[in-house]
Amino acid sequence: MATTRVSNANMMTFGEKLSRFSWSLFIPMCVVLIFSIIVLFSAGGGSWFPYAMSQIMKMIFGLVIFFIVAFSNIKTWIKSAYFIYAIALILIILVTFVGDVGMGAQRWLNLGFINIQPSEFIKIALVLALARYFAWQNSVELSQFKNYIVPILLFVIPFIFIFLQPDLGTGISVGLITLGMFYIVGANKKWFLIAFILGLIISPAVWYGALHDYQRDRVITFLNPDSDPRGAGYQINQAKIAFGSGGIIGKGYMSGTQSQQSFLPEKQTDFIFTMMGEEFGFMGAFLLLSIYTFIVIMLFWASKTCRNRFGQLVCFGFMLNFFVYYFINISMVLGLMPTVGVPLPLMSFGGSSLISLLFGFGLCQNAHIHKDQQLSSRGF
């Protein structure tokens, strides 16, 4: 890694930053946001309230954050990476003691004027912290297990509190993000095998001692969907009916029977993909998946073309985060994996997920804009 510090005289002007802005990443992101408003308007029964207008306000706030982050100095995020992680971790811990309970889980923190879900922000904060830690590790250091102890702790501490909320979906997400970051920096492959074996060994204890009854019911329902069709299996069965009834081109906008007649639970959040599939059919679902895939490709390309290691890791880590988001959600609502609480990125109603994602997109734009900037080794 080069150790040349860029002087202030060589810092880019706003015009130069704008010329490096990735429109190929920004435009598909905005297309999904617009698509979200269209579907949420339908979820509200053809009304701007309670979902669409509220989500527009959150989008405006999130886009302001996006642009501020995108055009700021990349060194700002290197210097503040651990601080941002610490704030996110404190919020996660606070939820355990003073968080609001909703739908059987204690995941929300009431700040008086707004409720936030800190587990959504820890995903981005973890990517930042791991990118900051690994950015100036050389190949010798990365081959030594002792240099992974701190990153393991950066993952394990929030994971414990997330699991206690309980929020299995986010716990799985941060675990996959961490494993992906370890893999890309060159961690020894045998460590992954050891971790997998240890996971198998402790899985019975997790099943009987750590999982809640409803979480075990979801796994059982996944393995046998007809075991409890009116109870644990109700959500997924209704989701399959809604998505399957959409056919190739869908039933038409605001014409979905399962969603409009409220047979489909959480149609505005976790199950928004099935509502969209019912109204817009396979073609609409395929279009959204195509845009998601294009975004992932652009994030990978941003990581690949970035010349500084910090930017590479931020883009790659966020790419993993974004992919895991929609992979788990879509797999869940189609019955390909057990039901867990993971929203559909940029689509589901809710502020914490949306704002954290737009913050992440801003970081990736920032890395892309500064992709040719060499950063001083361990100089922050």
Image: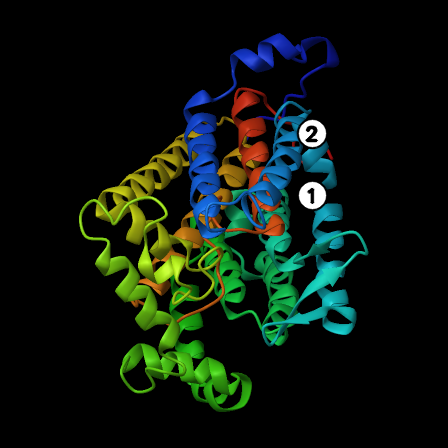
Q: Is residue 237 above or below residue 359?
A: below
Q: Position of residue 313 (x, y in %)?
A: 52, 40
Q: Amino acid at mark 2?
A: Lys
Q: Mark 1 Cα within 10 Å, few/some/many (few <14, many 20+)? A: many
> In the image shown, does 90 or 31 lie closer to the viewer?
31
Identify the secondary structure beneath mark 1. Answer: helix
Quarter placement of the N terminus? top right
Give the residue drawn at x 54%, y 84%. 210
Q: Position of residue 347 (x, y in %)?
A: 46, 46
Read off the residue under disc 1.
81
Give the residue drawn at x 59%, y 23%. 374
| Residue 136 visible, this orientation | no
Read off the residue under disc 2.
75
Q: Quadrant of residue 191?
A: bottom left
Quarter placement of the C terminus? top right
Q: Is residue 330 above or below residue 361?
A: below
> In the image shown, does 85 or 216 lie closer to the viewer?
216
Q: Quadrant of residue 197?
A: bottom left
Q: Is residue 5 above or below residue 14?
A: below
> In the image shown, does 377 or 248 lie closer to the viewer?
248
Q: Amino acid at mark 1?
A: Ala
Q: Is residue 232 above or below residue 209?
A: above
Q: Position of residue 40 (x, y in %)?
A: 48, 47
